[in-house]
Image (tube, helix red, strand yellow):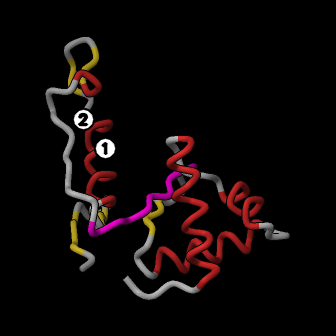
Amino acid sequence: MQELTKQQRAVLDVITNYINRNGISPTVSEISEAMGFKSPNSATLHLKALKKKGAIAIRDRTSRSITVIDRENSPLSIPSVNDSNYWFDGVFQHRRYERDVYRSLELAGVIVDVKASRVENKT
């Protein structure tokens, strides 16, 4: 991961603290408010820079989808197919399972190209 500026580090800290407190990632507006930015666009620019530097992953067109990437302390953990969260009336919910597998891969720092069903390692 590339070196972060002081402002980018502050935004990353806001995201990390929010996730630790609430269990979900903040919205762009919440980041903007916490940082004292006048416009949510400022937060968006910082998020794009953090994503480019490999500090976070963001799922496109999905609310609250910011994931902090901690390469040193994030072992790859794939959900079990036998987990009751993926079964409804005896039918396996493959899309829910795939979504959670993709999230696990992104947390581990792997780029997932869903449309092409291709997986690349960022490192």
**Location of residue 94 with respect to 92 vertically, above or below:** below
So how many labels did they put on this image?
A: 2
The x, y position of residue 77, in whole percent, is 20, 49
**Residues drawn in magenta:** 63-72
Q: Quadrant of residue 84?
A: top left
Give the amino acid at mark 2: His
Look at 47% across and 74% down and name the residue there.
Answer: 51
The x, y position of residue 92, in whole percent, is 21, 26
Q: Which residue is mark 1?
A: 100
Is residue 94 a member of the stretch shown in magenta?
no
Q: Which residue is mark 2?
A: 94
Look at 29% across and 69% down and name the residue there.
Answer: 71
Look at 51% across and 76% down and name the residue there.
Answer: 50
Quadrant where the N terminus lies?
Answer: bottom left
Classed neighbour count for the residue bearing mark 1: other residues with Cα under 10 Å, few (<14), some (14–19), many (≥20)? some
Secondary structure found at label 1: helix
Give the amino acid at mark 1: Asp
